[in-house]
Image: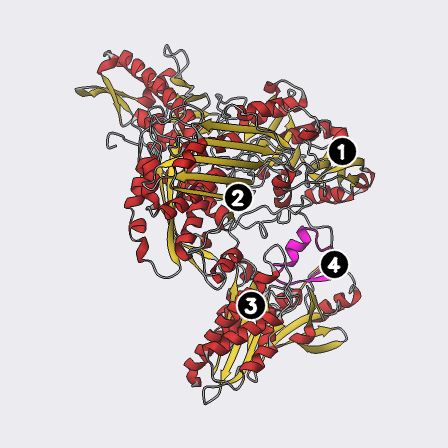
Amino acid sequence: MKAPAFDYEAPATLEEALGLLQARADDAKVLAGGQSLMPMLNMRLARPALIVDINRLPGLDYIRIAGGQLQVGALARHTAVASHPEVKKGWPVLAEAAAQIGHDAIRNRGTLAGSLAHSDPTAEHPAVLAALDGEVVVRSAKGERTLKADDFFLGYLTTALQPDELLTEVRFPALAPRTGSTFVEFAPRVGDFAVVGVAAAVTLGGDGSWQDVRLALTGVGGTPFRARQAESALKGKKPTAADIQAAAAQVAEAIEPDSDIKASARYRRHLARTLSERALTTAAERAAGQGGR
Amino acid sequence: MSAFAAIGKSARRVEGREKVTGTATYVADVHPRGAACARLVLSPYAHARIKSVELSAALQVPGVIAAFSGKDIGGAEILAIDEVYFAGEAVAVVVGETEAAAEDGADAVQVDYEPLPVVSDPIAAMKPDSPLTRAAQGESHDDAGAHGAAVGGAGTGRPKPRNVNQMVEFQRGDLAKGFAEADVVLEDTYRVARVHQGYMETQGSVAERAPGGGFTVWTTTQAAFGARDETAKFLGIPAHEVNVIPTQVGGGFGGKFVLVEPLAAALARRVRRPVRVILDRTQDFLVSHPAPGAVIRMKMGAKKDGTLTALEAELVFDAGCAPGAPTGIAALLLGGTYRCPNLDIVGYEVLTHKVSPGAYRAPGAPQAYYALESHMSRLADQLGLDPIEFRLKNAAKEGDIRPDGRPWPRIGLIECLEAARAHPMWRDRKKLGADEGVGVAVGGWGGGTEPATGGCRVNPDGSLTVQVGSVDITGVNTTFALIAAEVFGLPVEQVQIATNDTDHAPYAGASGGSKTTYTVGAAVLAAAQEARSQVIEMAADRLEAAPSDLDIADGRVFVKGAPNRGVTIGELARLANRFGSRYKPLHGQGRAAVHTASPGFAVQLCQTKVDRGSGMPRITGYVAVQDVGRALNPAEVIGQIRGGAVQGIGRALFEAMEHDEGGQLANATLADYTMPTAADIPDIEVVLIEVPSELGPFGAKGVGEPPAVPGAAAVVNAVEAAVGVRVKNVPIKPEVILDALEEGGKR
């Protein structure tokens, strides 16, 4: 349980960090909260030659609202996200998801940006990014680019992040009025990785019909799954239990989960259906509670 | 009970402060000057021939001091030499200046294997075309035969299937007649997973050559003397040349007897430096000895009034690559808990390509009772009888003959069942909401015995030092303090416990088998009583009174009826521990050889609510009833019972060592091998029943093992009560419940 030898740098500025990543792009790994990287190092599942510890970079732990948009810096921890009053008010699904990650000790160190960059197929935040049409800001010595979930998550533990790039910020657009949202997951034990998790955001029109529906799942494939077909099927309708059930069934049909030691593909499909139904129902109730009817 | 001064009142753990302040010394905290670190190289194959072990690259790694193959170190007990029989078997070891250097070196060891056929599942291993395991290849296992024979019945000439090391059989009456008399006959097969003890502290030992020759070994063990003997045997030196210093144990549960002690000492001898062998979690999962999985076929018959008429059972225990599975005791408990005139029980100990199991809290009993208690609740259901009434009708009591022909001594099974029946959780179980229900299950354990010695020294400050050679894994030291305090009428704080190393300790056996309080406690009681007699005798001389006229209270000996005539215990000790004194030092020695066990029974009630979305049962309430004989330290006893119940719930809902067909353990981390955490467990209400033992100190019985037995069946029976789904294999896969619910359940 000792990591293989590696070089360690803790740059004091972003420029320095990006310079290191550019110079050692092929064998460097960024350390933020370390909740996934440190176990991988100690179990020798990862053997980078250089660790670039970004924890000393100043001013990257912000959670702020700019132009109605939520911006979360690379060093904002899950606990900070989960407990931030503006997040809880404006992006409750994000706070709800953050609160379901692991245990306190993990949430106190782990970061939102790190969770996205690591892209574990059962992590909560990738599904939230997908559901809320968020984007990530990625910087390198050469410049900056922003990516949406569809373009960022490429596969199992694989993202569009290049070796010389650092994920510096995560952005979530404001939710429309009369939007209800939730994150629900199933894990056998409290604090386990989810087997399947569902992020839902539902916006009701003045007439109480589904104006906008956004539904994304984690744990059903290598990347978060945005259930666009089910979303379209619900849009324009008034929320009924039967429609929600039909949409949830459609989600279960559309996904292509794998079997692994935690769950069979069939069970994941089942959970995708029951959790989608729960998430849509709760989100719709919350939307209605905000005067959506 | 009010007759006792100290016994029966909850006392704080004597070692509690050092544990909660982080100052307790665990084996990984032991760093002798100049200590090197060792790292094992483990086989990735479950069965393979070792063609070569190439160490040269490892020796080039910076910081590596030495590397050894099995051949180099000698002794296949600790490192495989020619062939590996399970994935994770150690084939080489690297010693480095640091743990990281040793691990770098271990990564560089090149082992050339020739993979051989593997059989991982015990049922598959019994088939005629299965690959052969180690024992079946012609090695002798005489000692293994003796191991289970103590509880095995006479054979009936059943054929011995392939890869079966040992068979145990119990017969009684006429089985066919018994089934013919039955109104209801139920037959089914249950599977219980292989599980790990899951102690928090991984295994490890630190060894150093002693200045005068021999070795000092610090280790986390339940059996200091056992570790000494095994280490000396491996090194080929007399036992007295090894001194084992037992460190605080961060959980044992049967899993910590002897593991890496001989290796650590052998390495210290070879590299002429102290060597630390501390396993990480994954290596611990792979090389230590867990609890065996079992497949148990049950067939039972009963009359309408609930009288059992016949019990047929076939137990298959997966013994891994070496004999020693608890088949006999499992068969005995399975056939002895309820009165049944007609029995036929056969147990098979099957060898497979997995690590061999060791002891885990009531070895064999959780498997046996899972099958028995699942079956009993289902039979009650089919008979239309209350599950507790049905059990009470058949429950064994004192004098009933067990399958091995011996009568039960006084046991509290019926008292426990009656207490469970009277509990509000049981009485009100029909008032629960949808998808929620209560299940009941029984568990029992025979309890172990072993001779023991204890010492009790009277100190000049008036305190007592109790000396033992047993390791405290459960809080027994606090109980020893209570026992000595009771004898002297002293506050428990006036008693210190010295857990001595094997050079200095009075002999005691391993802390296992629920026997430490029962047997070492008896020795401590005798030692304290002898010390008290010495105190009285000396005081009689000082006070010029007859010993029978003296009494002790508040640390002072005085003449009955004339309390002013007295002398403090401290003063007596000071007089005896003095240059030129004519008094012998005050030091009691106690010996005990309690060789009749006092079996303990437990009944547990589980309340569960099944989530229809995931099929997952969540435990919403739990009651653990247990006959403890006498709770010497109720806080310790209650804690033990809660911990045992949690381990039972773990077996029911979460825990399984998952091996694939190639014998690979797929979940050798605590992220993947899931044990319940505090957040998954409700408050567990403990109900203590006291049916005193005639032999244990102050009536105490062993309490450690019974509470770990009933949990799996209690949970599964609760699931059936909640949603009408019968689960047969544990741990429960929620998917199985979901599937059954979609088919409309069983009701």
Mark 4 and mark 1: span between their CA atoms? 33 Å
Q: Are marks 1 and 3 on the same chain?
A: no
- Nearest to viewer (mark 1 / mark 2): 2
Q: Residue at x 51, y 73 (%)?
A: A93
Q: Which span is picked out in magenta?
A: A29-52
Mark 4 near mark 1, Cβ–Cβ under 8 Å?
no
Instruction: List the residue tagged with mark 3.
Output: A272
| 10 Å crowding of disc 3: few (<14), some (14-19), many (20+) | many
- Nearest to viewer (mark 3 / mark 4): 3
Q: Secondary structure at mark 2?
A: strand
Instruction: List the residue tagged with mark 4.
Output: A50
Relative image position of residue B214 (x, y in whole percent):
64, 22
Q: Nearer the viewer, residue B328 or B198?
A: B328
| 10 Å crowding of disc 1: few (<14), some (14-19), many (20+) | many
Q: Chain of mark 3?
A: A
Q: Residue at x 59, y 62 (%)?
A: A266
Mark 1 near mark 3, Cβ–Cβ under 8 Å?
no
Mark 3 near mark 4, Cβ–Cβ under 8 Å?
no
Q: Amino acid at mark 1?
A: Ser
| 10 Å crowding of disc 2: few (<14), some (14-19), many (20+) | many
Q: Chain of mark 2?
A: B
Q: Amino acid at mark 3?
A: Ala
Instruction: List the residue tagged with mark 1.
Output: B69
Q: Chain of mark 4?
A: A
Instruction: List the residue tagged with mark 2.
Output: B192
| 10 Å crowding of disc 4: few (<14), some (14-19), many (20+) | many
Above-or-below relation of A108 to B71:
below
Residue B350 lies left or right of residue B473; in this view the side is: right
Q: Sequence order check: which comes first, mark 1 or mark 2?
A: 1
Mark 3 near mark 2, Cβ–Cβ under 8 Å?
no
